[in-house]
Image (cartoon, rainbow, N blue to C red):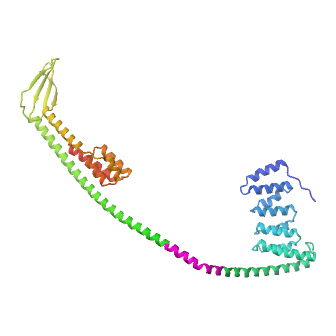
Amino acid sequence: MQERERISNMDFKEYQNNLRKNPRLTEEMRMLIESDLQFGLTIAETEEYSGKKYDMSQMKVYSKCLRNGFSKEAIAVITKEGLTGEQMAVAFEFFEKGVPLSVVEEIVGDTGKTAFVMKRLLQTIAEKAQETGMTQGGQEPYTRELLEQVREMVEKISNQEDRYDALNETLQQMKTAGQDVKVQNNLLMQLREKDGLLEKQQNEINEARVTIARLRNEMDGIQKEKEVLKQRAETMKQEMEKNKRQLSSLQKEKETKAPLTERPEEKTDGKGDKTTITHLPDMEYRTGIVDEKGRVVQMISIEPQQKKKEISAMTAFFSRVASKKKINLVKLLAQKNLETEQLAQIKLAIEKGLSEKQLLVLINNRIPAEQMEEIIEIAVLENKMEEA
């Protein structure tokens, strides 16, 4: 028997590193390969099974074949392509017990048989071989006779399996028939639940449609109101421009044509400069500042004291009227449950000086934030025109 050279420690460690780099190999697979190398198998022999797409159970059977020194022909039969790890294990077991390789090959030739069926067949054959004292080294005529018996047994088992499948199908149909009533009841119950769910969803859809129609009407009303406000703002803007032009024209006429009702009054300050004051009718005082030589160096206007007093009185009156009744904006906003964007627009409206009446319109109508922004701009323009 040819001696095998054991792999050196350096080569073994290097090969271990290569095995760890292989993503297909699990830890258990790597341990099997390392164990075979330590047992005395060569790297080339372990690669006979590690290089194929075997699972762990198949690799174990191949490893056993190598450790037992089986021939390549025997290994090819036992590890035939298409066999599972369990089927390979059965073929290995009975070949090891002395069942001829040709018989094992006949049994595992049909890979569609389960490992259980294969084991039952090989067990029967092994028992007959023991009774007659025939082993792997037995006579060829006996082997041929044994193969014929194997073929007959395989055919019988196949027929039995067919009958079993037919019987199993019949039993399954009977079982299914017995469950039909229960299944129908479950289906009816599920249908009733789905009908109830559909009805509920339909009611929700109808309510949503009604809400959408109401909101659409409100949007149309807001849009119409917005158009009216725009037209009003445009009209007021035109009137304001017209009034400005008229006031400018009147101002120029008064400055050029209005006669003086009083004689100029001269005043001299402590430095020697003279001030000339001219009284204009129902308008204002025009004051001229002159130097020591009598030359006018600057003209200024002073409103009559009486006019100022009347304006101050009117301002105080309106302030008192406005302060008599204040609305609680915080409470009102909390009651209306406005969205964050709407509240931001209300804050902007307050900062831009909208009146309480204008704020109440925005809050009570619950106008969308986008439209609030446009309406606030219109209200600001309107307030400016009223101030002018």
- The answer to whether 188 is drawn above or below residue 92 in the figure is below
Locate the C terminus and report the quarter of the image it occupies: top left
Magenta region, residue range: 172-192
Outermost residue on the top side: it is 271
Residue 361: in magenta span:
no
The image quarter containing residue 73 is bottom right
Residue 80 point in image, percent of width and height: 79, 68
Identity of the residue drawn at 14% across and 43% down: 246
Identity of the residue drawn at 83% across and 67% down: 92
Locate the N terminus and report the quarter of the image it occupies: bottom right
- Between 89 and 311, the residue placed more toward the observer is 311
Residue 80 in sight here:
no
Residue 68 point in image, percent of width and height: 87, 62
In this image, 97 relative to 316: left or right? right
In this image, 205 relative to 155: left or right? left
Residue 30 in sight here:
yes
Residue 149 point in image, percent of width and height: 85, 80
The image quarter containing residue 172 is bottom right
- Between 366 and 9, the residue placed more toward the observer is 366
In this image, 309 relative to 336: left or right? left
- Between 217 and 70, the residue placed more toward the observer is 217
> What type of secondary structure mainly makes up the magenta span?
helix
- The answer to whether 71 is drawn above or below residue 134 in the figure is above
Identity of the residue drawn at 79% across and 55% down: 31
Identity of the residue drawn at 78% across and 79% down: 157
Residue 341 point in image, percent of width and height: 37, 50
Residue 189: in magenta span:
yes
